[in-house]
Amino acid sequence: MPGPTQLDRWRALHDALSPDTFSDLLDLPHATLPDLLSGHAPPTGDVRARLEYLTDLQGRLDPPSAQRLSRWLTLRRFALNHRTPLELLRGAWTPLDPHARAIHDIAEADAYLSGL
């Protein structure tokens, strides 16, 4: 049986977050989200990269649940100068930005530690 499609993963990400948070993380207006999530307006460039980054982040959390992702994004982290991932992943960011890489590394470490 085939796994979830990319669009399914994006919808799951949307469902895991509030509409405001989802819109802010992608740096998109609310009005564009229905077309994005229906597949009628495929994302390009930075928006596509942000979606892939965020779905990867969600998949690293064990168990990957809506509540876990929302909570994880709001935890202050020493490695982020006591800021939250949500505070840093707003506006025009890309997965290659230093703070996005640091957040990815924290998620990877959390996933590793939860498997011990």
Image (cartoon, rainbow, N blue to C red):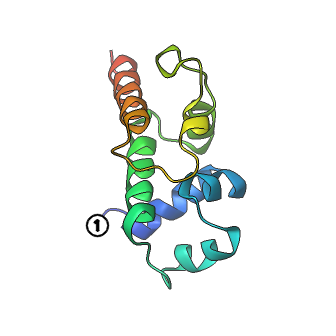
Q: In the image, residue 78 lies at what x, y percent?
A: 52, 14
At 49% from the left and 82% from the top, the residue drawn is 41
Q: Relative to 85, does residue 20 appear above or below in the rendering? A: below
- Where is residue 52, by image quadrant? bottom left
Residue to which mark 1 is pinned: 2
Say whether residue 8 is visible.
yes
- Where is residue 86, by image quadrant? top right
* Closest to the observer, 90 or 48: 90
- Relative to residue 40, is residue 70 drawn left or right? right
Q: Relative to 104, does residue 8 appear above or below in the rendering? A: below
Q: Relative to 50, does residue 77 appear above or below in the rendering? A: above
At 35% from the left and 28% from the top, the residue drawn is 105
Quadrant occupied by the C terminus: top left
At 58% from the left and 80% from the top, the residue drawn is 35
**10 Å crowding of disc 1: few (<14), some (14-19), many (20+):** few
* Closest to the observer, 93 or 74: 93
* Closest to the observer, 69 or 42: 42
Element assignment for label 1: loop
Quadrant occupied by the N terminus: bottom left
Q: In the image, residue 20 lies at what x, y percent?
A: 71, 55
Say whether residue 18 is visible.
no
Q: Residue furthest bottom?
A: 40
Q: Relative to 32, does residue 104 appear above or below in the rendering? A: above
Q: In the image, residue 95 lies at what x, y percent?
A: 37, 47
Q: Amino acid at mark 1?
A: Pro
